[in-house]
Image: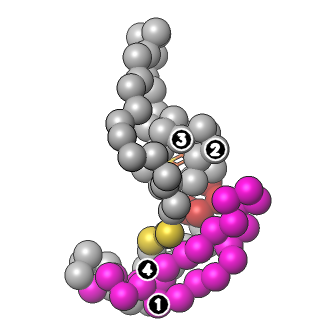
Amino acid sequence: MARVVRLVQTGPMKIEPAQTKPVWVCACGLSKTFPICDGSHKTTAKQEQPGKLYHYDPSTLDVKRIEDDPMAEASGEAKG
Ligand code: FES
């Protein structure tokens, strides 16, 4: 499973945690508070299948299109 994420920034984003608690960095690319996780990854975990490429609506997080992932084999992910 993989997803298409549109990023428009061209440089790094500085994070200076002001607390000693852990900071969760978004690795799914769907967070509305990117680069900090906001829990949006929970919408992907149950429905995404290996070998598929998912396109999400960035405002609703609804899946708009699913296709075979042309990079799945190269990344070691089996096609489903
Ligand atoms: S990992 Fe992306 S929202 Fe949590």
Determine the CA span between mark 4 and mark 2. 24 Å
Q: Compared with residue 49, is residue 56 higher up or lower down, i.e. above or below?
A: above
Q: Quadrant of the C terminus?
A: bottom left
Q: Nearer the viewer, mark 2 or mark 1?
A: 2
Q: Which residue is depicted at the point 67% across and 59% down?
A: 58
Q: Is residue 39 visible to us here?
A: no
* Disc 3: which residue: 34
- Amino acid at pointer 1: Asp
* Disc 1: which residue: 68
- Amino acid at pointer 4: Pro
Determine crowd level at label 1: few under 14, some 14-19, many 20+ residues with C-alpha closer than 10 A.
Answer: some
Q: Compared with residue 12, is residue 7 higher up or lower down, i.e. above or below?
A: below
Q: Which residue is depicted at the point 53% across and 88% down?
A: 67
Q: Quadrant of the N terminus?
A: bottom left
- Where does the image place residue 35, in percent across and percent down from the top left? 48, 39
- Where does the image place residue 33, in percent across and percent down from the top left? 60, 38
